[in-house]
Amino acid sequence: MAPDLMITAGTHNVATQPTTFGKRLRMFAEKILSAFQSLANFL
């Protein structure tokens, strides 16, 4: 999939909004990285 592919994104009880696949992928990666950093700080 191309990073500039337009998709809709939304969460619970919120209207969907247009965004790009690349932005959603980057946001997911940032959340995963943050979780690993939090885990490393905890250990």
Image (tube, helix red, strand yellow):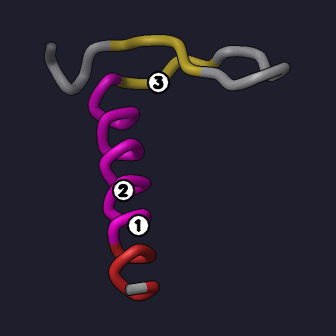
Q: Is residue 34 magenta?
A: yes
Q: Callout 1, which amino acid?
A: Ser
- Going from the N terminus, do you reach mark 1 or mark 3 first? 3
Q: Position of residue 1 (x, y in %)?
A: 15, 13
Looking at the image, is 17 positioned above or below residue 32? above
Q: Residues within 10 Å of mark 2 (few under 14, many from 20)?
A: few
**Residue carrying label 2:** 30
Instruction: Indicate the quadrant where residue 36 lies.
Output: bottom left
Q: Which residue is at 31% across, 35% downward?
A: 25
Could you tell which of marks 2 and 3 lies nearer the N-terminus?
Answer: 3
Q: CA distance from mark 1 to mark 3?
A: 22 Å
Q: Residue at x 32, y 23 (%)?
A: 21
> What are the residue bounds of the magenta stretch?
21-36
In this rendering, the count of numbered labels is 3
Q: Is residue 26 above or below residue 18?
A: below
Distance (Cα) linking label 2 and label 3: 17 Å
- Kindly report which numbered mark, 2 or 3, lies closer to the viewer in this rendering: 2
Badge 3 is on which residue? 19
Q: Secondary structure at mark 1?
A: helix
Mark 1, residues whose alpha carbon is within 10 Å: few (<14), some, or many (≥20)? few
In the visual, does 5 lie left or right of 15?
left
- In the picture, measured across the screen, residue 36 lies left or right of residue 8, that is left
**Quadrant in the picture for residue 13:** top right
Residue ID at (36%, 54%): 32
- Farthest right residue? 13
Residue that numbered label 1 is attached to: 34
Q: Do the CB atoms of the residues marked 1 and 2 lie less than 8 Å apart?
A: yes
Residue 24 x/y as whole percent: 39, 33
Q: Dot 3, how many residues are within 10 Å of its Cα: few (below 14), some (14-19), or many (20+)? A: some
